[in-house]
Image (tube, coloured by chain):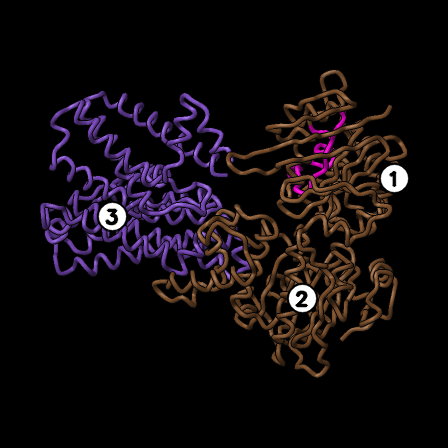
Chain colours: A brown, B purple
Amino acid sequence: MTVSLSAQHVVKRYGGVVALADGHLEVRSGEVVALLGANGSGKSTLSKIITGVVAPNEGQLQLNGQPITFASPRDARRAGIAAVYQELSLIPDMSVAENIWLTHEPYQLWRVNRRKMRQDTQKLLDLFGGTYRASLTPDAPINSLPPDERQIVEILKALSFQPRIIILDEATASLDSQQVDRLFDLVARWKSEGMAVVFVSHRMEEIFRIADRATVLRNGRHVGDRLMQGTTERDLVNLMIESAAQPHAHERPPLQADAPVRLQVENLQAGPIAGVNLTLRDGELLGLGGLQGQGQSELLLALFGALPISRGTVTLSGERVRYGHPWEAMERGVAFVPGDRGSEGLLLSRSILENMHLPSWAKFGFPLKMRQAEAEAQRSADELRLVMAGLGAPVSSLSGGNAQKVVIGKWLLRSPRLLLLNDPTKGVDVGAKGEFYTLLNQLRAQGTAILFYSSDDDELIGLCDRVLVLHDGQVSADLRGGDVTRVNLVSASMGGGGAVVGG
Amino acid sequence: MTSQTSSGQGGVTGLLGQIGRVPPALLALILAVILFFVGGLLNPNFVNANQAVNIVRLAAFLGIVAAGQTLVIISGNEGIDLSVGGIVTLAAILIYRISDGNDTLLLPALGVALLAGTLIGVINGLGIIAINIPPLVMTLGMTGVIQGTILVVTQGELIGDTPPLLAQVIAAPGPLGIPGVVIVWVVLGLLMWLLLERTTYGKQLFAIGVNRRTARLSGVRVPQVVIATYALSGMLAAFGGFVLLGFTQTVFLNLGGPYLFPSIAAVVVGGTLLAGGKGGYFGTMSGALVLTLIESLLRAAQLQEAYQLMVFGLILLALLTIYGRQRNLRQ
């Protein structure tokens, strides 16, 4: 049975704001279509329209050539359309099986058939067999799972509806490379079985790997379709942004081998970190790589005083330090951009001003010198080219890339000497990424030492002179210069790879 | 987003949506003024300067007791202080007993009362932070401890007296016929605004109310802020006891009890989010005015006590429904 879905000239307005001015998308059996666009281009609105989450103001949806309207996501699912979102829709206190089968539990007479539910869940989990920890079972509660495994459950939940058309909206953002590979194997299988797939991602490399065609949106308008064969990354980026800035084309400041050592870590043990050594000099950008959840976040948290250190030493600018609270690290010029903006980096309902100065209010005296605080925040916002209605607007009104600028801005206001970054470009659009890379290089030129974890290998390759790959809480490879390649990163992240060197 | 669509709808929902966009503190204040004149319709004697002064004076007691409650509720994580009633009583009894009607001992007695209130607040904070007891349970338990202690120490015999100076400062009409308590309340209002909006503590208080993990990772010492907040709440409740004694000029074992639930209601009617992280003291002041007015109105309408309670409860529900809508609209 073949299937096709098309959206023609769809428009969505929220009050006076036009989120989608002219959306257009077509997908057929056996096809993977990538939906591309910078943040705010309308691609999430378009994907929400085809999954029945929001209703369009104008335009038409056609399923297998017949006009159709969806009153709810339930309607869309009944028509065979299911979506996987990056913002997880799972209920934390319920088990994996309960979440997957929520609203369509298998019944035996009047009771939920728990045995069948568990068995079916296990069958689904087997699709990703070998890429997750043993603790992921049908009975595991969601809140016990790390982000990548939650994302897998989210994918399986969509699959449990046996869709004919599946929308993957940034579904790979928290998966590691092995899990992504598996997902892509599955996508290939779905294609051959006649399913249609819509793939939304910021990762260009992934788009080239699995998509047959790309549909590009810019500022709410469909600006073109490209067959992946015969197009280039440059071409797509040009379509996505008006002034195409190649994210990876930038000058790196020269590495200064004799710069003073800012941070020295010896045999550090904290949580899952099992003996890490590293040295970081002023003006150096040291990358941290590896699969998700190998201890990268914990290493950064420990260096910021947010996770107790059980053994080992940390030396900052020649002085041995041991922090009981992040505040003590901040006093010594350490800054930390956490991995999860919403839950760790921002006060969503508070103003941009309050978010920017949260670490620094004390310096404005009593009563707080608000005019000075506003002037400083405004300057920082201008430097970061923050697009906002005003400093008084709540952070929740900002797009992902702009919200991340607030998180970074609040630390730049303190002129940090050591900057710890936990996957800072996750879910940030291409344009904002480019600005961020430029900023990192400026900071390096000013002598800031930067420790940078990224789940995007291309980013590490493009930015870092040196990358430590973590595996099971240990450094499995210390890659330098020309050795920072995708092949080396991937092999080291699987636990194999280069010489194990510390220091 | 939703706010735009709601304006298109007619009828009650549309109207509620419109009302929902006015800032809560202002809404409560407007409501207070309307209620005052509604009182005039029911009973022409209701609207006059004396009555207005009287209502503001009654609202001042509630408002002062609710000041600490405002801080605790803003601090989030189910923050609530059920021990304010007990602290009010304890503080009044302490001042009554220590000063024993002696004007010169009034300030030292006030000092002891404030210290006791602060100490109880610190213990509340420690229990909540160090032993992880939910605020509701911790402060409720503390109420029991305070009442028990009062009984054990006084053996039920409340001896002492109110210093004439206190009664004069609080209850007697001051300049322009405005009672001292109202002036005290207005000054407290300004100080609370300064505390919430113009100090590092205030900014950090809102931060922990919204998201404690973000606050901690931005260098806020969350435990210290929480303990300081409960300590302030205890101290402000003790100050409430001081003011209340000036009005009643006598003490009894349940002096502060009746103020506990109105103190929470005033905060919420004033638009402070029960979930924490959003609100302010001007809202609470307006809330205290609204609650006092409703009570006075019901009394002026000469309804039976039971009906007064029922109507009061229904009005509260209606108010909170409007605020609930507003929250949905803003999200």
Pick out the residue farthest to the right. Answer: A192
Compared with A115, A330 (above or below) is: below
Camera-nearest label, 1 or 3: 1
Camera-nearest label, 2 or 1: 1
Q: Residue type at mark 2?
A: Ser
Seen at 62% across and 65% down, the residue is A439
For label 1, the residue is A188
- Number of on-image labels: 3
Residue A293: give x, y in percent of width and height: 74, 55
Numbered badge on residue B241: 3
Query: Left of A470 or right of it: where is A328?
Result: left
Q: Quadrant of residue A139?
A: top right
Q: Quadrant of the C terminus of chain A?
A: bottom right
Q: Is residue B86 visible?
A: no
Q: Quadrant of residue A270?
A: bottom right
Query: Left of B5 or right of it: where is B304?
Result: left
Seen at 64% across and 47% down, the residue is A39
Residue nearest the viewer, comparing A359 with A388: A388
The alpha-carbon separation of the residues under discs 3 and 2 comes to 49 Å
Which secondary structure lies at badge 2?
loop
The range drawn in magenta is A80-102
Residue A477: give x, y in percent of width and height: 82, 67
| In magenta segment, residue B42 | no
